[in-house]
């Protein structure tokens, strides 16, 4: 009797240990390559979380590989970033200008023009009711956690991230004559 | 054939073990403790110019429970791929006098990008006294300076540091001048450097 139990236990224990030994590998992939990001809140409405009741949260593929370097971040990318106001929370915003751009800010920011410093980004939510760079100014690209590349859930919304937001770079605004 | 197969299987096994071991070490060094070398003279009386190794407590990641006077490791806001190690000399809500000893700002051609402010004409920048100014540290940020103020690129240049860039707090430093452990090496605990000037502040620092 004890013989069979003993070998079964040994087998289970071994399999558990093998599984546990792969957990750090999963962690490294999730932390540095890609992960699933859940969008909470309404600051990216209507691009993400278009339904206001919050019952269906959008899930996106969050590409993390080399995402802190400014060369891999482009204007109109949707990014997850660590909040500069409270480092424990994560914001989802759209990059609207990069280093060296002159930005025309909107409401909470009263300045006429803002210059985005080196390795910094200007981020805004697609929803006008959003706490973004107009409140806390340009953010360092070191705060970026990952780039949202594809909506994978809910299944009716599977597809690439739609475009959205306004143009705020002064150089582009003057090109269009506005 | 079977020998080659056996060889490939053994090789795969070794690679698999190596991947898991490296991943585990990475997880540990990201979240628990990290042992890394420091260099540079910006923290000079506290940390040596070279051959000094820092023991970084990662439980203080993102500035969790850090206090004024702690030595922290953080990404540089204007160059996120490089890491700096500085002492926190101001927390959110503090009013900081940047550095009156620097006088007027010179050498603007090198670092005017790093100034976070409204765009001004070059003439206005050259005639303003940028270092002799006060800054209120915003919520979620801190003010960091090197202990060697004369040779340190810190918050006086790149302004306030977001707490989200902090990766940990240096609790111990270990000076190892030779690879062979003989004589000269010493391990010491880094103390909180905050000395309150006013008696009523005395309980806030530690």
Image (cartoon, coloured by chain):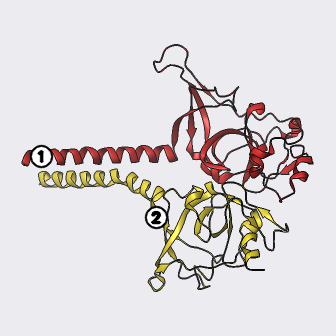
- Looking at the image, residue A29 sits to the left or right of residue A101; the answer is left
Q: Distance between the residues labelled 2 and 1?
A: 37 Å
Q: Residue at x 17, y 51 (%)?
A: A6
**Residue A94 place in picture, x, y as percent:** 63, 71
The picture quadrant where one finds residue A42 is bottom right
Q: Which residue is drawn at 50% across and 60% down?
A: A64
Q: In which quarter of the image is the C terminus of chain A?
A: bottom right
Element on which disc 1 rests: helix
Q: Colour of chain B?
A: red
Q: Callout 2 environment at 10 Å: few (<14), some (14 to 19), or many (20+)? A: some
Q: Which chain carries label 1?
A: B
Q: Callout 1 environment at 10 Å: few (<14), some (14 to 19), or many (20+)? A: few
2 or 1: mark nearer the eye: 1
- Which label belongs to residue A35? 2
Q: Which chain is yellow?
A: A
Looking at the picture, tell me which residue is in the foreground, B93 or B131.
Answer: B131
**Residue B99 place in picture, x, y as percent:** 85, 39
Identify whether B22 is placed above or below B50. Answer: below
Looking at the picture, tell me which residue is in the foreground, A11 or B66.
Answer: B66
**Residue B127 place in picture, x, y as percent:** 92, 47
Looking at the rendered structure, the number of numbered marks drawn on it comes to: 2
Q: Which residue is drawn at 22% across and 45% down?
A: B11
Identify whether B38 is placed above or below A83. Answer: above
Residue A41 appears in view: yes
Q: Name the residue under label 1.
A: B4
Q: Mark 2 lies on which chain?
A: A
**Residue B204 place in picture, x, y as percent:** 78, 42
Identify whether A76 is placed above or below B149. Answer: below
């Amino acid at each position: 009797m004890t013989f069979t139990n003993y070998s079964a236990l040994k087998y289970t224990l071994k399999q558990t240990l093998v599984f546990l030994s792969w957990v750090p590998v999963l962690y490294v992939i999730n932390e540095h390559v890609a992960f699933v990001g859940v969008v909470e809140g309404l600051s990216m409405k209507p691009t993400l979380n278009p339904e206001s009741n919050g019952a269906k949260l959008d899930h996106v593929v969050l590409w993390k590989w080399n995402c802190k370097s400014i060369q891999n971040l482009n204007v109109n990318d949707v990014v997850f970033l660590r909040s500069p106001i409270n480092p424990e929370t994560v914001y989802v915003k759209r990059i609207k200008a990069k280093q060296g751009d002159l930005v025309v800010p909107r409401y909470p920011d009263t300045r006429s023009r803002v210059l985005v410093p080196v390795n910094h980004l200007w981020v805004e939510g697609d929803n006008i009711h959003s706490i973004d760079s107009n409140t806390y100014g340009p953010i360092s690209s070191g705060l970026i956690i990952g780039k949202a590349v594809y909506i994978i859930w809910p299944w009716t919304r599977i597809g690439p991230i739609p475009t959205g937001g306004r143009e705020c770079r002064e150089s582009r605004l003057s090109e269009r004559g506005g | 054939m079977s020998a080659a197969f056996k060889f490939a299987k053994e090789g795969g096994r070794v690679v698999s073990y190596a991947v898991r071991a490296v991943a585990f070490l990475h997880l540990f060094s990201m979240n628990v403790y990290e042992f890394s070398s420091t260099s540079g003279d910006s923290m000079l009386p506290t940390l040596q110019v070279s051959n000094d190794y820092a023991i970084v407590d990662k439980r203080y990641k993102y500035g969790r429970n850090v206090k004024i006077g702690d030595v922290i490791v953080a990404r540089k806001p204007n160059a996120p791929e490089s890491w700096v190690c500085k002492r926190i000399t101001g927390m959110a809500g503090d009013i900081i006098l940047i550095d009156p000893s620097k006088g007027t700002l010179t050498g603007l051609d090198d670092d005017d990008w790093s100034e976070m402010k409204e765009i001004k004409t070059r003439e206005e920048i050259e005639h303003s006294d940028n270092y002799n100014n006060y800054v209120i540290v915003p919520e979620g940020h801190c003010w960091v300076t090197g202990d060697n103020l004369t040779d340190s690129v810190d918050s006086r240049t790149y302004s306030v540091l977001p707490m989200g860039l902090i990766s940990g707090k240096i609790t111990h430093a270990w000076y190892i001048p030779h690879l062979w452990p003989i004589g000269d090496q010493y391990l010491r605990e880094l103390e909180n450097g905050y000395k309150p000037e006013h008696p009523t502040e005395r309980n806030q620092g530690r």
